[in-house]
Amino acid sequence: MICKKILIEHQNRLSSGKKTMDHNIQNDLEKLRQEAQTRLTQRISQAQYDLELYQTELEIQHEELRRSYHELNNLYEEYWFLYYFAPCGYITLNHNRLITRVNHKAAELLTSKDSLLINLGFSRFLAKEDQNLFLQRLEKAEHSGETEHLEVQLTPSEQKPTWVRLDVQPHFTQGGKVSQWQITLVELKST
């Protein structure tokens, strides 16, 4: 019987110790849960603050980009007007020597609407005797990289020939090949 009593006392102590231990574990777990909840709340608050700050920065950058876009658009319109209505002709040829861009004065000198000139060879508008000279100067400019100047006669259809001064400037790719030609046409007045 004494053994049984000791055994029961031992079981009671174990049971009481287990209850105490379970209670301590539950307290520890509750503390850990509260601590984790506090840390999570702090991290969420910090992340929310960071996102709001980032959004404000993006809104400022967006407004700066919008303002820059409008400024560039205004400059583009201003320079387009200056280019298109310049008192001298401007023509851009691609690497195949076909017209890709032309302003109003150049179209007028070639007696055609500018849209009808796109993808035509420029040399077709030159007097026959000036076509070889023009091609030679293109090659010279291509090799030297310098602007070439020459006077040629334009022979547009249905108009009398017109003398013009051409300034021919090559533009190169990074590989050193001609990407395009910029040609300025200045009408020479006969005296």
Image: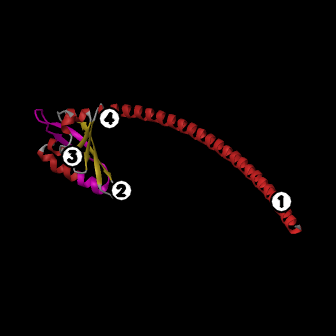
Q: Amino acid at mark 2?
A: Gln
In this picture, residue 49 sits left or right of residue 14: left
What amino acid is at disc 4?
A: Tyr
Residue sitting nearer the eye, 113 or 131: 113
Q: Residues within 10 Å of mark 3 (few under 14, many from 20)?
A: some
The reply to whether discs 3 and 2 touch (Cβ–Cβ < 8 Å) is no
- In three-dimensional space, the C-alpha distance between marks 1 and 3, rounded to whole angstroms, equals 104 Å
Mark linked to residue 12: 1
Q: Residue at x 20, y 34 (%)?
A: 109
Element type at mark 2: loop
3D distance between C-alphas at marks 3 and 2:
21 Å
Please state which of the two labelled residues, at mark 1 or mark 3, is closer to the viewer. 1
x and y, in percent, of residue 185 in the image? 25, 39
Q: Which residues are magenta?
A: 138-166
Which numbered disc, 4 or 1, marks the residue that appears first in the sequence? 1
The picture places residue 92, in percent across and down from the top left corner, at 27, 43
Task: Determine whether the residue tagged by mark 4 lies in a helix, strand or loop.
Answer: helix
Q: Earlier in the sequence, mark 3 or mark 2?
A: 3
Residue 83, numbered label:
4
Seen from this angle, which residue lies furthest bottom? 3
Q: For the view shown, which residue lies furthest in the right direction?
A: 2
Q: Is residue 168 visible?
A: no
Magenta-span inclusion, residue 77: no
Q: Which mark is residue 98?
A: 3
> In which quadrant of the rendered view does residue 104 lie?
top left
Query: In this orientation, which residue lies closer to the viewer: 184 or 33?
Result: 33
Real-space Cα distance between discs 2 and 4? 26 Å
Camera-side mark, 2 or 4: 2
The residue carrying mark 2 is: 174
Residue 24 in the figure: left or right of residue 104: right
| Residue 182 position within the rendered picture, expressed as x and y whole percent measured from the top left | 29, 44
As drawn, is 90 to the left or to the right of 62? Answer: left
